[in-house]
Image: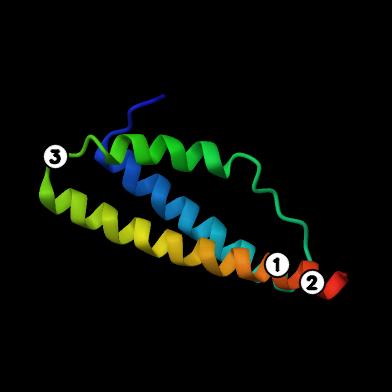
Amino acid sequence: MDELSIDEVKVRLNNINSYVGECLIRINKGEFLDLSNLNDQITTICGSIDKIDNSEDKKLVSDLMADLVGRLDRLEISIKDKQEFKA
């Protein structure tokens, strides 16, 4: 697993947050979503987060992760709603 610097973690978290936000919009339009490598990206980020020692950095990254988890939860609900609608 790659170890990321704190700056790389922040950038990747922001990018994934943005992508998941776009997915929330796209799913409501009925568009196809490619979430195929999202798990690998998040696994890499989490591995690097575990190694952060600076408490301020850890807090910032924790806040970004909380935002991401919230968006992923909303995306999961939206996907399930679309699947139920089609059934």
Q: Are marks 2 and 1 in contact (CB under 8 Å)?
A: yes
Reply above or below: 11 against 3: below
Closer to the chain start, of discs 1 and 3, is 3
Q: Which residue in the protein does label 1 denote?
A: 80
Q: Residue at x 23, y 34 (%)?
A: 51
On screen, residue 60 versus residue 22, left or right, reads left
Residue bearing the label numbered 2: 84
The answer to whether residue 26 is visible is no
* Element class at badge 3: loop
| Residue occupied by mark 3 | 53
Residue 1, percent from left and from top: 41, 24
Labels 2 and 3 touching (C-beta < 8 A)? no
Task: Give amino acid for label 1.
Answer: Lys
Question: Residue at point 19% right, 56% down?
Answer: 59
Amino acid beneath label 2: Glu
- Distance from Cα at disc 2 to Cα at disc 1: 6 Å
Left or right for 69, reference 29: left
Q: Residue at x 36, y 56 (%)?
A: 65
Circle nearer the viewer, 1 or 3 = 1
